[in-house]
Amino acid sequence: MSKTNPMCKTTLYNHFISVFNLILLLGASALIMSCGATNKSLTRSEQCTLNRYEYASIHMGSRCSIVLYAPTENQAAEAVNKAFVRIAQVEQVLSDYRSNSESMLATSQPSGEWVPASPTFIEVLELSKGFFEISEGAFDPTVGVYTHLWRSAKNTNRIPTQDELAIAKYSVGFEHVSVDHQNMRVRFDRPNMILDFGAIGKGYAADCALAVLSDLGYDSAIVDLGGDLAIGRSPPGDAVGWVVTVQPGNSAEWSSQWSSSGIATSGDLERHYVYRGIRYSHILDPRTGLGVTYPRAVTVVAEDAATADALASIVSVVGEGAISLLQSEFSGVQVRVDTGRAFENSHLDSTLP
Ligand code: ADP
Ligand code: MG
């Protein structure tokens, strides 16, 4: 399966807080860096005076911060604006919070009919299909009909009933989605399907933003979209990479250095719902429509952020047993699972947003 996002070259979401806080601790705060940069699009003298710039904006219901090295503030701001525009475009394709997103409009068409689709929509569906197949259905964006049931049930302090889940089940299953890449169209074979790209959308969008920066010549950059990170070339003059600190909920934080990769987290520390003493994660088991109840916090490092995002969700559903298969299928994947035993002693009634 494709492990990269080729269309991101120039080319969601949840409204909760990420389970982990990924903190970028950039080793050097000095503005003027050495001539170690290898940015092809910049002149030699520009490379000698690369400065560090940082920007933040809200996208996909999350804080998105971008750090990049560029010769001037104007150049940095112009590039980052383009990256943010690209993220907004991706959100408009994938969001299940917007009734007019491409995804929501497509699934509102009569089932069984082909619907024209944009390159971004096609690509995310194809990536999702790969993750659906490799995880034997544990990763499945068609859980949207379940997640929308949960959202409305939580608003009335309950959980979905067995009857509601049984009816919804008919509209769940990525096997009912067909993607026709050649003719740029998609088909949904069950009525009332809803796509929820919450488990891949932010990672994918972060990759797209990083690709925009790279295409403009800014290779030393990092995009953090709600805790899902697309990491570019190392900061100039730094051979090892960007220092990223992961703080997995109640467990001790840990740090390492990475470049040219993606990091994502999944878990239920902050995004869960406690009902009658049972703690349900926002990550659902597609077979039952119920939130996963085993507390775990998963961090994945992969070659891009979309892959890391999807794999972290898969391990959240399946557990540590999935790790060796994922590592054999995807090169360079590292997985860390924190089981957060402190969770078991918490007495939260509800963490409704
Ligand atoms: P986070 O939002 O903490 O980064 P994830 O990347 O794991 O966590 O995404 C979880 C979101 O993905 C859920 O809030 C929901 O929108 C969606 N989702 C839930 N269960 C699944 C699943 N089994 N497969 C695909 N998407 C899911
Ligand atoms: Mg995910």
Image (spheres, helix red, strand yellow):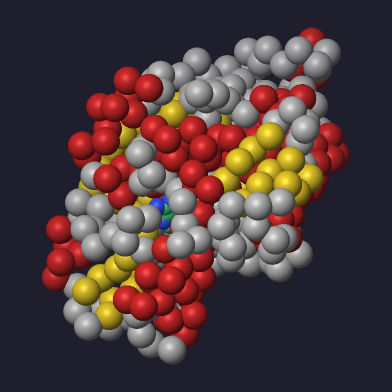
Residue 120 horizontal/vertical position (percent): 71, 40
Q: Residue furthest front?
A: 112
Instruction: Name above or below for residue 39 compared with residue 53.
Output: above
Which residue is the extreme one toward the bottom?
Answer: 156
What x and y, as percent, mark residue 35? Answer: 67, 13
Residue ID at (59%, 35%): 126
Number of marks in picture: 0
- Which quarter of the picture shows residue 318? top left
Residue 5 lies, in percent from the top left, at 62, 29
Q: Front-most of 115 and 74?
A: 115
The answer to whether residue 317 is seen in the rendering is yes
- Where is residue 148 shown, x and y percent of the image? 51, 70
Query: Looking at the image, which is closer to me, 205 or 115?
Result: 115
Is any atom of residue 51 visible in this view?
A: no
Q: Residue at x 63, y 13 (%)?
A: 36
Who is closer to the viewer here, 300 or 101?
101
- Taking the image as shown, residue 42 lies to the left or right of residue 265, namely right
For residue 3, side relative to residue 207 (left or right): left
Tell me the residue at 36%/63% (across/down).
289
What residue is at 30 percent from the left and 68 percent from the top? Answer: 280
